[in-house]
Image (tube, rainbow, N blue to C red):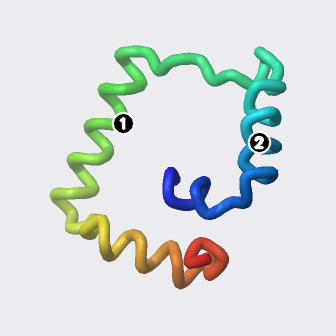
Amino acid sequence: MYGMVMQLSPDDRLRLRDSLYDMEEDDVLEPYTEAELSQMMKEGLEDYRQGRCCTAEEGMKQLEEKHPWLQE
């Protein structure tokens, strides 16, 4: 994410900063509950056990193939 932001022009970075500051409080996500975190961890572990996982490099390659503008 940092690399993508740093590729923006200084003006675009300022616009991004201002947009983030201007977000309404309603747009802020609530923290996960312990039960939600536990469920996500169980699902992730089951995905891993079933072989539904990949390395970070493989995941990034898949994202870039699906969304070519991420390579810019």
Q: Name which quarter of the figure residue 26 lies in.
A: top right
Q: What element does badge 1 sit on?
A: helix
Q: Nearer the viewer, residue 11 or 26?
A: 11
- Residue 14's label in the rendered image is 2
- The residue located at (59%, 72%) in the rendering is 70
Q: Few, some or many C-alpha atoms within 10 Å of disc 2 (few <14, some 14-19, many ≥20)?
A: few
Q: What residue sits right under mark 1 in the picture? A: 40
Q: What element does badge 2 sit on?
A: helix
Q: Name which quarter of the figure residue 18 lies in.
A: top right
Residue reaching furthest to the front: 10
- Residue 65's label in the rendered image is none
Amino acid at circle 2: Leu
Relative to 25, say whether 6 is above or below.
below
Q: Nearer the viewer, residue 2 or 51?
A: 2
- The residue located at (66%, 76%) in the rendering is 69
Q: Nearer the viewer, mark 1 or mark 2?
A: 2
Q: Nearer the viewer, residue 20 or 39?
A: 20
Amino acid at circle 1: Met
Residue 9 rendering spot, x and y as whole percentages: 73, 59
Report the side of 65 relative to 53 (left or right): right
Report the side of 70 relative to 12 (left or right): left
Relative to 29, say whether 41 is above or below.
below
Q: Name which quarter of the figure residue 27 lies in.
A: top right
Q: Few, some or many C-alpha atoms within 10 Å of disc 1 (few <14, some 14-19, many ≥20)?
A: few
Residue 43 rendering spot, x and y as whole percentages: 32, 44
Earlier-in-chain disc, 1 versus 2? 2
Quadrant where the image shows the C terminus: bottom right
- The residue located at (72%, 48%) in the rendering is 13
Say how many tags the image has: 2
Report the side of 9 relative to 65 (left or right): right
Relative to 41, say whether 2 is above or below.
below
How far is mark 1 from mark 2, CA to CA? 35 Å
